[in-house]
Amino acid sequence: MTGHELSPAALIPEHDRQRLLECKHHAPHDFYGRHAVAGNTVVRTRLLGATDVQLLIHNDAVQMHHTGDDIWIAELEGEHASDYRLKVTYPDAEPQIIADPYFFLPTVGSLDLHLIAEGRHERLWEVLGANVHTYTTDLGQVTGTAFAVWAPNAKGVAVVGDFCNWNPNQYPMRTLGSTGVWEIFIPGIAPGAHYKFAVQTSEGYRVDKADPLAKATLAPPETVSVVADTTAYEWRDAEWMQRRQGVDPANSPMSVYECHIGSWKQGSNYNTLREELVPYLVEHGFTHVEFLPVAEHPFGGSWGYQVSGYYAPTARWGTPDEFRALVDELHAHNIGVLVDWVPAHFPKDAWALARFDGTALYEHPDWRRGEQKDWGTYVFDFGRNEVRNFLVANALYWCEEFHLDGLRVDAVASMLYLDYSREPGEWLPNQFGGREHWDAVQFLQEMNATVHRTHPGVITVAEESTAWPGVTAPTESDGLGFSLKWNMGWMNDSLEYFSLDPIHRSYHHNEITFSLVYAFSEKYVLPFSHDEVVHGKGSLWTRMPGDDWNKAAGLRALYGYMFSHPGKQLMFMGCEWGQTTEWDEAHSVNWDNLADDWGHDYHKGIRRLVRDLNLVYRDTPALFSQDNTPMGFQWIKGDDAQNNILAYIRWGADGSAVLAVVNLSGASQPNYRLGSPKAGTWELLINTDDAVYGGAGNELLPTVDTEPTTWDQFDQSLNLHIPAMSVQLYTLRG
């Protein structure tokens, strides 16, 4: 079989040819590939730098005609079978046989496009971005990568990468109707290939963009996307995942260790954490770990809160599969994994999401809604279907692909309020003239409802610093639908109170009791987070008044009070031993505080206390099983401001009880009487003043029996020795 001389109909019309050469054509597949033209079969291809191209069809080789600009055309008389290959020769290289990228039908289907347009595609990562596919054709299997990207205002988009010398002329993409999705399948592109999207803007300039849905990247400062194989990792946590579905997180023990991977120990990565962090968490009794954002981010100093690659674990600490292995190892040791998730804003880097197709695409076009000037970042356009879809699907992606047990959503307040951190004239009211950002509210509700529907047992946690109503109320009751909310009020009041010299605390008693006024209005986490140990705030240690002995006693009392208070527990790395220095992401936490030389026993004692608190908390239903109802809390003594003493009972759903006795003064109370709602024996569980924790070591009775003496409006009471600056936890045994 031979091809005849080209007819005029076989050539590409000049107007379209020029647009193709400029990478500004919306439909290159209409001209490249196989087409029926005037009753004949025409195959066109553009192969940059090729010296010879032959069309392999019907077990024959047909010489293709070079028509200039690296375009090759063959015209065959009549209709011919659709499948073919190209035999391509490049200078100083052996010929290679390839499948034609412009032969294949779109890899994004009409239903996919419909769902994307409506903002309802819950598995967006499977159709956009870079996805490895294998197709069975008449001439055999073809494996390669399908590329797809949303860029509705672009004049043209091409895939560029190390496989085409980053030249946009080799693989221009086609648009799929009015959806703004551009697509191409390129045979032979395997996992590990480096790529970007070359976007021709309506203003006439080209910008090379990282893939918004890239599943892997090169480590910063590189900005390149990497084709990933999401099917290679074999999970071992089926039992954990099955068990998780039956857990009610609101009424289960949850003690979270918040961790920044890069500075837990300098040089840490996903692999070293499997070997070092996992046994550390097990030894110290934490039930969960929460990683500061692990999604790709260009600036390490943002701690991950300025995300550029929402679908890619940062390559600075390893590969996606290495992160999967870390999660797997944590699950194998019964530790849940939460990750900070940041839909509130994104950086302005020109190679990332910002002005993606030359226009405000992911961000709101009006700077009064589309920028967060305090942070120098853009704000997502939550009212746009495709943007909302991008974010909701991203939440699902982390749960699905990395088996996460929870997402902590950063800076929720910045999304909820249109005037957040803005001066008059710098924000736009909503359609009712108010400050509520209803598009963001709808997005958060959709995200929460979808995550909880598709991944039972996964929790979502809001960092929300205002009194927005119903943050943890179900979406069907018009709440935001979060599982838990950080109790920022408790955190601020507690730290303010504990920073006072004990002699002044009696005048601030309401600061330590006020949290119980609203403790059950939401489902709370009690956080001592990274935000409290940076930016000149010092460490928790430095906030405690007095000398080292008193600082240590203050921290031990703070933690005893924290673990007995309604709510889940969270502390940032280093807090578990009372790190003396402020956190700095460029350095390891201060492990020197735990050295064996003089002066470090206090820190070892604090760490031991946190371990014991975790173990007692985890095994004591009274401390967690009724966290979110007044039925789980009972005041015994809440008004003794003069002595800085609190006493209360935590009731378990099983009827068990724990009595917390809190002395936040500098004076011991050797004979302090407290009422008891039941007769019986109270057994000492925890004494923060114990010598093993670095305390004074006052000998306390291991058990105390109630007496039929009316006190505090109870028929029974008990007499206790309460050391200065200490917390005791007792459990009722009869």
Image: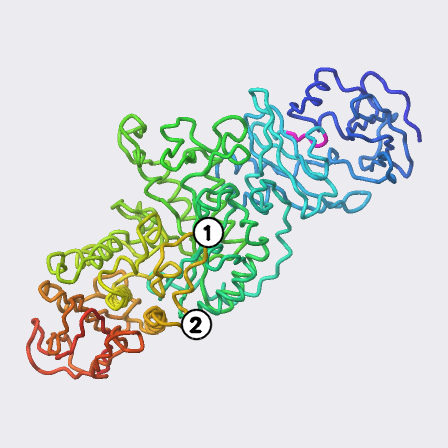
- In the displayed structure image, the side of residue 542 where residue 27 appears, left or right: right
Q: Main secondary structure of the magenta part?
A: loop
Q: Quadrant of residue 565?
A: bottom left
Q: Secondary structure at mark 2?
A: helix
Give residue 719's mark: none
Q: Mark 2 or mark 1: which is in front?
A: 1
Q: Give the residue displayed 45% in from the left and 58% down from the top.
A: 588
Q: Nearer the viewer, residue 679 or 548?
A: 548
Q: Give the residue displayed 79% in from the left and 22% down from the top.
A: 37
Give residue 586's mark: 1
Q: Give the residue displayed 11% in from the left and 67% down from the top.
A: 643
Q: Which residues are magenta?
A: 170-174
Q: Position of residue 589 (x, y in %)?
A: 42, 59
Asked if the magenta segment contains residue 173, the reply would be yes
- In the displayed structure image, the side of residue 533 where residue 137 appears, left or right: right
Give the quadrant of the C terminus. bottom left
Sequence-first disc among 2 and 1: 2
Asked if the magenta segment contains residue 84, the reply would be no
Q: Quadrant of residue 728?
A: bottom left
Q: Is residue 703 above or below residue 726?
A: below
**Residue placed under numbered mark 2 in the picture:** 283
Amino acid type of the residue that numbered disc 1 sits on in the rendered structure = Ala
